[in-house]
Amino acid sequence: MGNDLKIDALPAAWKPLVKRDGDTAKPPALDTATLERILIHGDLGQLTPSQKITYYKTVCESVGLNPMTQPFSYLVLNNREVLYAKREATEQLRFIHSVSIDPAHFTRELVEGVYVVTAPASVPSGRTDVSTGAVWIEGLKGDARANAMMRAETKAKRRVTLSICGLGMLDETEIETIPNAYVVAPDATVPQEPQPAAPPVEEARPALLPPGAVYITKVETGTGAIQGFIHHTGQEVAQGARNDGLPLYNAGLLTIATECCQQRTPVKIVTILATKSGKPYVKSISRVKAPPTDAEIDRELDQQDLARRAGDVF
């Protein structure tokens, strides 16, 4: 019974972490030294992954946040691991508690190169609060200056939201300016819903080529009267050709073959038999229009759909 009285005096977020007298379950209980370090020094790094989950969920439930949206994350600050609020936290808090923030009532001023935005907020009960957001903008121009000024307003809105909702913790827009502070990825934060297995990736379908068309896959340099040899797909190569490639006796054909190989252009190849050796060689190479890609087909279908819709309207 004495242990239960001590537990009742703890903050609500810590009660699930400590075992009560007579408990038959085995929650992730904390020893006294660890609990003292966490409560006095605020260091969550002493918690085990399962204890972090319990604490995380309890904090979310105490302010009405959905833990599955991960409204908080962990930050190491001054050698202590603490929670900080993310955008998901402040947006949910504004909705849940009907926090009213009207930019028309913001005050904006430039103080020695620092752009300061003061944001007032109120809740239906009539309680009000005010917070500021400040960023350094001296020397910034164009988009960089505009983005910095918008960041100051974001800081002010998020800070006043946390303040009026009673959460005395850092917002994610503040940690970037704190020296030696960095975000950590703990072993476990909030339980994740099982994700469905990704569908198997389908292999790319080979392009449908016109009858007799092939791709040149390799071009080799020849010797003597032979300018080169080509390798291709889609046609059987006659036996006896060097490395199963077809010889080229024309330098112009060698240039065309090289370009088509590099550009992955389909071609039609005409061969004839040499008078003396009876072996085939390349007589001509003609380019063939490449088949449309999947992206080109999708784009054409989209254009046709837009044209059809435009016709329906007009």
Image (tube, grey):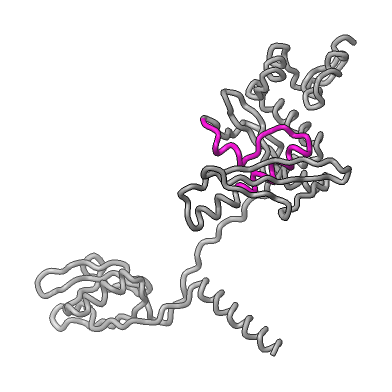
Vertically, is 53 above or below 255?
above
Q: Is residue 99 magenta?
A: no
Question: What residue lies at 78% left-to-right and 23% top-to-bottom?
Answer: 14
234 left or right, relative to 33: left
Question: What residue lies at 53% left-to-right and 76% top-to-bottom?
Answer: 297
19 left or right, relative to 74: right
Q: Is residue 162 magenta?
A: yes
- Out of 38 and 90, give the one closest to the viewer: 90
Which stretch did the figure color magenta? 152-179
Q: How many marks?
A: 0
Question: What residue lies at 62% left-to-right and 31% top-to-bottom?
Answer: 187
Vertically, is 203 above or below 194?
below
Question: What residue lies at 31% left-to-right and 83% top-to-bottom?
Answer: 286
Instruction: Give coordinates of residue 239: x percent, y percent.
Output: 26, 71
Instruction: Give coordinates of residue 295: x percent, y percent.
Output: 52, 71
Q: Quadrant of the N terminus?
A: top right
Vertically, is 207 above or below 17?
below
- Residue at the outermost top position: 2
